[in-house]
Image: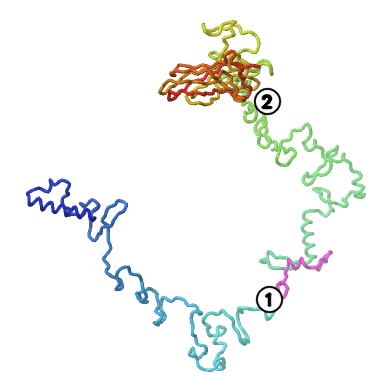
Amino acid sequence: MTTDKIHKIILSLLLGIWSLGFGISTSVAQGVRPPVDRLQDLTDVLIASPTNTQVLTYDSASGKWKNAAGGGAVSSVFGRTGAVTAQTGDYTATQVTNAADTAASYSNPSWITALIWSKITNTPVTLAGYGITGTLSEFNAALTGADFATGGGTVTGASSGTNTGDQTSVSGNAGTATALQTARNIDGQPFDGTANITVIAPGTHAASSKTTPVDADELPLVDSAASNVLKKLTWANLKATIKAYFDTLYPSGSGTATGTNTGDQASIVGITGTLAQFNTALTGADFATGGGTVTGASSGTNTGDQTAASLGLGTSDSPQFAGVNVGAATDTTITRTGAGDIAVEGNAIYRAGGTDVPVTDGGTGSSTAAGAATNLGLGTGDSPQFTGVNVGHATDTTISRASAGQIAVEGVNVLMNGGALGTPSSGIATNLTGTADGLTAGDVTRNHAVYAGASPPTVDVGVFTISVTGVNMKAAGTTTVFTVPTGRKFVCTGAYFIVTSVTTAGAGTETFKIQESGASGAMTAATVSGSGTPAVGTYYGQYALPGSGPFTACAAGNIVQVVVSTSQAGSTAVTGTIFVSGFYSA
């Protein structure tokens, strides 16, 4: 509770006492709060659902005291009060789980499950230290074979480690051995463990060669019929087995000539003469390629001279294949995809009267002219875009786009309904109509058009005007009107500034001129100015007056500019549209 609150409570009590003495109600005491008898009535205390043992804690986020669960009261720890920290002697080994007291002794405690030998110190160095009496000779004499695992006794404990001393014999496997006492043969090779030995495959490879085997020579053989044990096979038995197998495939060459006679026969029973004489007497006419006939079985290898016709591949034959590989075994295969249709590597080959070639494959996707035009975006309902359209000739009558909504023929603008009339390069305009103030037949002096500053004419159109909107004529400065196109030179005949917006109009002077950007040469008089109060719809003019030159013609690539030198001092803002008139000269 703050000092201010305490002061207010005391003041309230005093006022209450004073009011009792004078019979004045405390409720009418202005600016004094009645006494507070509950914590939750204080403005900086927020208590919700209080319960026993709760305490007040300050919440800096809300700036209020709030009720919260509190801990039990602790008056001291280990007899110490205040901020208590642990000290030596606060706890004993019996108070800590699995702790050992260095001053105590333990008899095989359950919480010690393993202990390495290096942790055990002060071990005895004699047998007597372990409670064994008698000499080592007496101990050895008392031992017999029955005292170990090889006899009827039992050796307990780990058997690993090095067994040193004089052992006359050891049964079982030695922990470490450098050589076998008696060498053993492996595949005929003695092995005592001191070095690697070579058997069958590497041994055979390293052996010396023999060019001509004899019947008694032996080969190693794995007998699959006897659990793959190693056996030997003589060269004589190998030859006999191979001959018996081939005799079932090839006849001996003797006997009748019926059936299939394959292989090389040195002689045929019933035919006299040598094999060379027989071969010499044979010609192509003795076989199916000539006038003779081959009888008997047709299986086996048919050698000799076979023509394409005899194989059904003649020029008059029509063999059937699943596919035909052209020039390579796999990458150019011709196949049949349907009646009358073929493909190369799965890609259809289009033919007359077949499937229409789609646009994606370079076709039109249609078998009719109208359908083809539509598929190519050239149908009657399409709006194709071209750079130009040649009419009746490849080069001399090209229709092109001059600008938005304006076309030209060979670069000359065409008069559009509602558009401006361009001046033809030669000839006389005829059959022209218009309003009373517009263009009439034979009147070419009224051929005057207004162009936006961003789109000036590129050809000679006579006198024309360029307009630029939103020009600030209040502040002195320079505004771009347009850039003279290539091959042209612009001569200015005059300029007008029409006021379109005025803020807080007042008397002032407007002075401006038309200037070329290249040499900053004046294109109109620079001294003419207008004074007065500007208003929307009023205008100021500037001319190239006779006798006040010379003036500069703006060359191709340079910019025609409006230069304001004297502002409207009496007005807050003056904005309008500038119109600059002139013509192109050679």
Rendering coords of residue 137 (x, y %): 57, 93
* Inter-mark Cα distance, 1 to 2: 86 Å
Q: Residue at x 49, y 88 (%)?
A: 130
Q: Main secondary structure of the magenta part?
A: loop
Rendering coords of residue 297 (x, y %): 78, 45
Q: Is residue 161 visible?
A: yes
Residue for badge 1: 193
Residue for badge 2: 352
Q: Is residue 513 above or below residue 100?
A: above
Q: Is residue 164 above or below residue 447?
A: below
- Is residue 111 magenta-colored? no
Q: Is residue 346 above or below residue 113?
A: above
Q: Residues within 10 Å of mark 1 (few under 14, many from 20)?
A: some
| Label at residue 139 | none
- Is residue 213 magenta-colored? yes
Rendering coords of residue 107 (x, y %): 40, 82
Foreground residue, 432 or 139?
Answer: 432
Looking at the rendered structure, the kind of residue marked 2 is Ala
Looking at the rendered structure, the kind of residue marked 1 is Gly
Q: Residue at x 43, y 23 (%)?
A: 571
What residue span does the magenta drawing correspond to? Answer: 187-216
Q: Residue at x 59, y 8 (%)?
A: 444
Rendering coords of residue 1 (x, y %): 23, 56
Foreground residue, 467 or 96?
Answer: 467
SS at circle 1: loop
Q: Residue at x 62, y 86 (%)?
A: 167
